[in-house]
């Protein structure tokens, strides 16, 4: 297989490889994107979505209550510090 047969097969093989790569690479990328897109969007059953919503509302309610407790603690601390400063100023 020497001579003109090799001289014709090498360029034909090269052009066939270029065509395969030019068509194959975009096709493989498209297929991988399609597979990745399907795995990134998990579907939650309705009962789990309802539970998550109820948990979210419960956490919101608890955060409001914790904020009220913190405000009461700040108020109590302020009253106690004012009372102690009055005693320190009046006793001297």
Image (cartoon, rainbow, N blue to C red):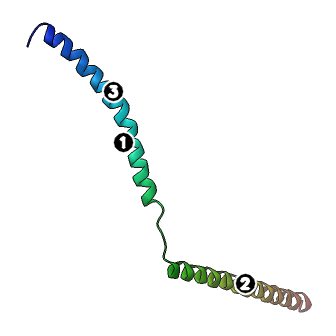
**Residue 66 or 73: which is nearer the viewer?**
66
* Residue 48 higher or lower than 43, as above or below: below
Q: Please tell me which residue is depicted at 48% across the width and 62% down the height of the picture.
A: 41
Mark 3 packing: few (<14 Cα in 10 Å), some, or many (20+)? Answer: few
Q: Please tell me which residue is depicted at 38% across the width and 40% down the height of the picture.
A: 27
**Residue 54 or 43: which is nearer the viewer?**
43
| Mark 2, residue position | 70
Q: Please tell me which residue is depicted at 77% across the width and 84% down the height of the picture.
A: 71
**Residue 46 or 73: which is nearer the viewer?**
46
Circles 3 and 1: CB atoms closer than 8 Å? no
Q: Is residue 7 left or right of residue 76?
A: left
Q: Position of residue 68 (x, y in %)?
A: 75, 86
Q: Position of residue 47 (x, y in %)?
A: 51, 82
Circles 2 and 1: CB atoms closer than 8 Å? no
* Residue 17 higher or lower than 89, as above or below: above
| Mark 1, residue position | 28
Give the secondary structure at mark 2. Answer: helix
| Mark 3, residue position | 19
Query: Of discs 3 and 2, which sits in the foreground?
Result: 3
> Mark 2 vs mark 1: which is more N-terminal?
1
> Mark 3 vs mark 2: which is more N-terminal?
3
Measure the C-alpha gap from mark 2 to mark 1. Answer: 58 Å
Q: Please tell me which residue is depicted at 24% across the width and 18% down the height of the picture.
A: 12
* Residue 28 higher or lower than 3, as above or below: below
Q: Is residue 20 left or right of residue 3?
A: right
Q: Is residue 45 left or right of residue 91?
A: left
Circles 3 and 2: CB atoms closer than 8 Å? no
Mark 2 packing: few (<14 Cα in 10 Å), some, or many (20+)? Answer: few
- Outermost residue, right side: 90
Measure the C-alpha gap from mark 3 to mark 2. Answer: 70 Å
């Amino acid at each position: 297989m020497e001579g003109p047969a090799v001289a014709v097969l090498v360029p034909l093989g090269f052009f066939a490889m270029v065509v395969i790569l030019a068509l194959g690479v975009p096709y493989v990328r498209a297929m991988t994107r399609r597979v990745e897109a399907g795995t990134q969007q998990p579907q939650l059953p309705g009962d789990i979505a309802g539970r998550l919503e109820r948990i979210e509302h419960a956490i919101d309610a608890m955060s409001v209550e914790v904020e009220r407790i913190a405000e009461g603690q700040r108020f109590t601390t302020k009253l106690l510090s004012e009372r102690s400063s009055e005693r320190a100023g009046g006793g001297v």
